[in-house]
Image (cartoon, helix red, strand yellow):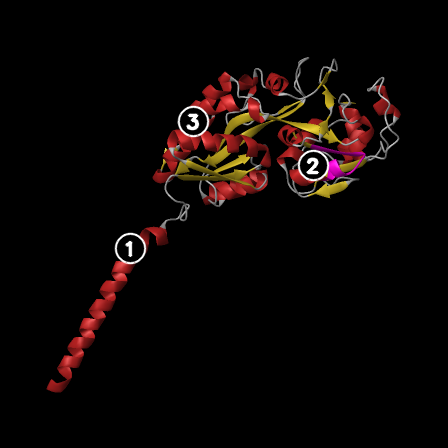
Amino acid sequence: METKKPAVRVGRLLLIVLIAATVGTLLYFAPRLFVQYHKDVPAGELRSGGTSAALFMVDKWKDVYRKETGINLKYKSTGSTEGITGVIDRTFSIGFTHNPLTDEQKKKARETGGEVLHIPVAICAVVPIYNLKELKGKAPLNFTREVLADIFLGNIKRWNDPALAKINDGVKLPDTAIEVVYREDKSGTTFIFTEYMQGASEEWTKKIGPAASKVDWPVGAGMARSVDVLARVAQKDGAIGYADLLHAQGQKAMTYGAVQNKDKTAFIHADPDNMAAAAKGLAAEMGEDLTFHLTNKSGKDTYPICGGIWAVCYQNLPADHHKIVVDFLTWATHDGQKFTKECTYAPLPDDIVKRVDGKLKLMKAS
């Protein structure tokens, strides 16, 4: 028995060393193994994503914000729906969308991480884009809601249709076939466009229905993303589609039409000033959750196909994410607003910014 004792002692010693090494390893790696929120995000980085309608603005913001604060704002253009999903599953700290969360998304968010806040950051616009080679360099065509409805329903098939000629007096419209181009994926752009179009005619109500981020269009070619819609319209003579203003202005060859205002007194070609007109007095009618609708607003200078862009995030965040998110959203809705116009958006009215300040105070570190 005495001859076995050294072996037993060595075995025990090896066991103790192994346990100590294991404990040390766990202690060293524990923060990375057990962090549940953005476990792979470096310090000083803020991850976000969502609608491509926010891409130009966020690109501008991130350069300025990094210089001012040292925080690196990351943005992934995924579309509004995926931006919201990214917040819910904590891929993103902030998701950008230009249609509010659905009841189903809110329910999933509450089950996953609690209440989600909608923080408006800018006003955007959707425009009818088209390609007619014979009218290159000419003044933009006029459109009414009724004419757009008949085009997207497939009732107006050629560009020289009498309904188009009537609202474009003096323009020699070509006898060119119309090809409708639309977003086939879920899209905030589609939501704003169909919100504007809802009720345009009995046929529209029957075939298309209420505003939706995805529609079963009766005619045309479906494209996966906004850039694909623009590419198709730019390539096809006679094509028409819809896109966010920033995308239309970002394409040198792209033309977008003027749309009749709700008052039916003028045809409005979208720009930041007439987009801002749509948000005038909005704070008084805005819901407690800071969501709103901006299509078909009255006013002789108001562009009728406007919407909001929201930054969405959880109301309660871990302490290390809380400050970085609140600080950025405060900056975006104050200092960041001066960059909106140069990026083809309209800034938030002051009374909405005040309401945003109140909402940001509700955010808690957990």
Amino acid at pointer 3:
Thr
Cα gap from disc 1 to disc 2, whole angstroms: 51 Å
Numbered label attached to residue 230: 2
Q: Residue at x 81, y 34 (%)?
A: 238
Magenta part of the chain: 232-242
Q: Residue at x 54, y 40 (%)?
A: 83
Residue 244 or residue 356, whichever sits in front: 244
Residue 320 shows up from this direction? yes
Judged from the image, the secondary structure of the residue bearing numbered disc 3 is helix
The residue mark sitting in front, 2 or 3, is: 2
Numbered label attached to residue 330: 3
Task: Write down the residue under mark 1.
Answer: 28
Q: In the figure, is residue 175 to the left or right of 278?
A: right
Q: Quadrant of the N terminus?
A: bottom left
Place of residue 61 in the rendered image (x, y in percent of width and height, measured from the top left): 48, 30
Q: Earlier in the sequence, mark 2 or mark 3?
A: 2
The residue mark sitting in front, 1 or 2, is: 2
Q: Can residue 303 be found in the magenta stretch?
A: no
Judged from the image, the secondary structure of the residue bearing numbered disc 1 is helix
Q: Quadrant of residue 51?
A: top right
Mark 2 in CB contact with mark 3 (< 8 angstroms): no
Task: Using a 10 Å C-alpha cutoff, classify the residue at mark 1 as few (fewer than 14 neighbours), some (14 to 19) or many (20 or more).
Answer: few
Count every numbered label the image shows and give the total: 3
Q: Earlier in the sequence, mark 1 or mark 3?
A: 1
